[in-house]
Amino acid sequence: METIQQDIHKESDSAWPKKVPHRDWHAFKVELKAAAKSLGIDDIGITSADPFLELKERLIRHRELGRESGFEEPDLDRRTNPALLFDRPQSIIAIAVAYPSKLADAPKSEPGARRGIFARASWGVDYHTALRERLARLEDWLRERVPEARVESMVDTGALSDRAVAERAGLGWSAKNCSIISPKLGSWIYLGEIITNLPLPPDTPIPDMCGSCTKCIDACPTGALVGPGQLDSNKCISFLTQTKVMLPDEYMRKIGNRLYGCDTCQIVCPANRGKNWTHHAELQPDPELAKPLLVPLLTIGNREFKEQFGSLSGSWRGKKPIQRNAVIALGNFREKSAVPSLIDVLLKDPRPVLRGTAAWSLGRIGGEEAAAALRQAAEQEADAEAAEAIARAMIVISASEEAPAENIRP
Ligand code: SF4
Ligand code: SF4
């Protein structure tokens, strides 16, 4: 209760809010939507501020089944009831901003110069920044026209579900891959919203257009889409790439060369065919950042990491998960030229998760140099989990020495 009161006070002035004068809200909504482009927004939809009752049921089931990622707002009431976040809300304005899906002049990942990849949602400037700027412009636009307007913007880290708001506001349908798909923009969109006391007429939700398609479910590498629109976050590569722990062998293999996030279930989606949005300059990627070389990431310092990758939303968990994923990617590439760098991680990195992951990677690459380093590491490793990973990698290497020729990369 205390938190609710604090939030309400945050968005309102100490004075009792002034009453919003009557006006033609239909005409106002038309004017608002027409202004979207000039505010840098690609689509606007309106929904009521009623509680999201169906969502709450789904979130309860999701929690009971242990499918949460742990990154979510824990209070299900706050996630589903706008009235707990805002004093007497009347409506919610949902916005969509489209981002690119193609990397122009993408650098090639080649033997000796392997590269990882960040998910598309992380390519340009951090979307929290991009959306907050646009929402701030929209807030100003509203206040200029209605001085009595009270507004509270939310982006991703807000308690409300951006997707549930966007769906009910008619920006797109809630698809089997758990994305919101806009018929005109596809699912390459950032979502944000403003809760307000303005009584704007709601838009109509878009009916489900997935039909009998199951491409996303079939393509998911880990089976994380356990049903249409049902995600087991603990199996989802997008979530796994953001963790800081030692990952199970199965998931490390499936991560491939992803450094942050996973786009597979959106790439295969027919609704995204031909959709690549290049009209927002700050959302365009620097190909060297979106697809960086892997080996330099292993030794990157904190300051250098912040300078190079700090503007990407994919850096929000710091450099450790990105470095762990770079180690995994080199193992998945079986990149022999990276063996000395991986040995340095195995023997010298102060973080046990990195040492254990380097052991896994060296086991996957194989060879006498890797085997000798693993033997040395086994003698000096003090961390139990890393020691276990080293022991497993040594078994993998001995098994691969006996493996038939087709398992050995030239
Ligand atoms: Fe599966 Fe990747 Fe989609 Fe997660 S993001 S559901 S792992 S395809
Ligand atoms: Fe829907 Fe098919 Fe796209 Fe999956 S791939 S979200 S089922 S249209």
Image (spheres, grey):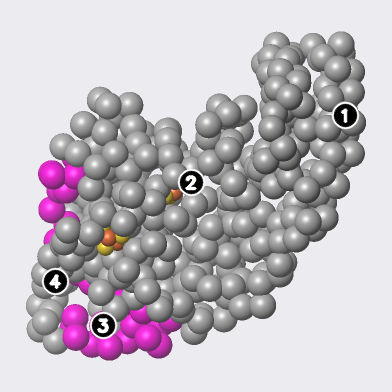
Q: Position of residue 64 (x, y in %)?
A: 25, 25
* Magenta highlight range: 28-56
Q: Position of residue 117 (x, y in %)?
A: 62, 57
Label 1 environment density (alpha carbons within 10 Å; few <14, some 14–19, many ≥20): few
- Amino acid identity at mark 1: Glu
Q: Which mark's residue is nearer the viewer, 4 or 2?
A: 2
The magenta stretch spans residue 270:
no
**Between discs 3 and 1, the one toward the N terminus:** 3
**Side (left or right) of 363 relative to 200:** right
Mark 3–mark 1 Cα distance, whole angstroms, equals: 67 Å
- Amino acid identity at mark 2: Ser
Tell whether label 3 touches label 4 (CB within 8 Å). Answer: no
Mark 4–mark 3 Cα distance, whole angstroms, equals: 13 Å
Mark 3–mark 2 Cα distance, whole angstroms, equals: 35 Å
Tell whether label 1 touches label 3 (CB within 8 Å). Answer: no
In this rendering, the count of numbered labels is 4
Residue at which label 2 appears? 238
Q: Which mark's residue is nearer the viewer, 4 or 1?
A: 1
Mark 4–mark 2 Cα distance, whole angstroms, equals: 31 Å
Q: Is residue 136 depicted above or below 296 in this figure?
A: below
| Secondary structure type for disc 3 | helix
| Tag shown at residue 32 | 3
**Side (left or right) of 376 relative to 98:** right
Q: Is residue 399 depicted above or below 113 in this figure?
A: above
Mark 4–mark 1 Cα distance, whole angstroms, equals: 65 Å
Q: Position of residue 251 (x, y in %)?
A: 53, 35
**Between discs 4 and 3, the one toward the N terminus:** 3
Label 4 environment density (alpha carbons within 10 Å; few <14, some 14–19, many ≥20): some
Residue at which label 1 appears? 368
Q: Quadrant of residue 135?
A: bottom left
- Amino acid identity at mark 4: Asp
Comparing 296 with 407, the one in front is 407
